[in-house]
Image (tube, helix red, strand yellow):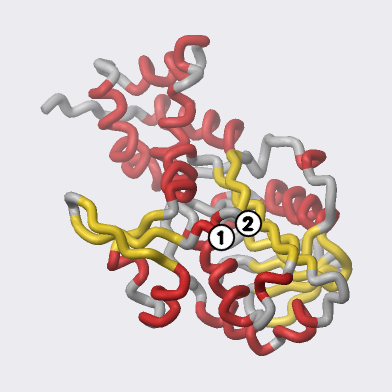
Amino acid sequence: MINIEITAEEFEKIRKFVKAKVGISLSDQKATMVRGRLHKRLLELGMSSFSEYYRYLNSPEGEEEISNFINAISTNVTSFFRSPHHWTYLKENLNEIFLSKPNKKIRIWSAACSSGEEPYSIMIFLRENLKDFDKWDIKILATDISHKALAKALKGEYSEKDVESMQKAVIHRNFTPKKTPTGVVYEIDPILKSKIMFRSFNLVNDDFSIFKFHLDIIFCRNVMIYFDKETRRSLISRFAKLLNKGSLFIMGDSEAITENKNEFALIKSSIYKKI
């Protein structure tokens, strides 16, 4: 197999391209990771250097390749009911967050939803905890920059390993097992899927004016760690404008709001309330 190395100059060009396209800031230590994740694409395209690939990305012919590039660079690690303390908090405060709503209307954004486990977890949580779930007007917007991840999310099928963290009764109520040539997959209940709108959205460069209503909760977990300070500050301000006063903003376990303290108040580790 051809072994294509990446030079410091090539890495610097790709690093700037990533920052401009999706806001991800890559440290000097990420050169090996970038080479590893893009090497296969270069071979598939018959290219012999990262400079050639970079020129292709910036050409009209390479416009469709940008999606493959983003899929390779971005990290899509997720699972059902990730960060258990978030779900514990929501359950313990069910009345204040959900049941007190007079119009039985809930609007949630799962930003950077990856392959769908997060928005489906939200729907399963609501069905399991709202006794009159069917009478609620619930809509979730689930977005990601990766077309590959969104395709899996839209399909709504998961392996036995993917769902093993949930109780069997919960799986039974919310999934249908289906035999395939490669084994059993679990298909999410169409009722739950119908309440979720999946779409491609770039948190850094896309237009937030598409939002025509305020939100009750925004989940944006394990994304901010890839952004620099100014990008985080700007993005959190945009989130704040979309939330109703008192609504929740939920981040990843290793993330925190260090700026924007006039917009959000910390109520529990990685859980914030719009001021």
Q: Where's the N terminus, which quadrant?
A: top left
Q: Position of residue 216 (x, y in %)?
A: 77, 65
Query: Which residue is at the front of the view, 229 or 74?
Result: 74
Q: Which residue is at a point 47% across and 36% down the rendered structure image? A: 70
Q: Residues within 10 Å of mark 1 (few under 14, many from 20)?
A: few
Q: Position of residue 118 (x, y in %)?
A: 53, 62
Q: Where's the C terminus, which quadrant?
A: bottom right
State whether residue 12 appears in this view: no
Three-letter amino acid code at disc 1? Ile
Q: Which residue is at a point 69% across and 58% down the rendered structure image? A: 139
Query: Which residue is at the front of the view, 202 or 195?
Result: 195
Say if mark 2 contacts mark 1, CB within 8 Å.
Answer: yes
Q: Position of residue 255 (x, y in %)?
A: 60, 66
Between the C-alphas of marks 2 and 1, the distance is 7 Å
Question: Of the numbered discs in the image, which one, if any, rests on residue 195?
Answer: 2
- Element under label 1? helix
Q: Position of residue 102 (x, y in %)?
A: 87, 75
Locate residue 153 relative to residue 232 in the image: left or right. left
Mark 2 or 1: in front is 1
Locate residue 212 relative to residue 91 in the image: left or right. right
Q: Which residue is at a point 51% across and 80% down the rendered structure image? A: 84
Q: Give the residue pinned by disc 1.
A: 191
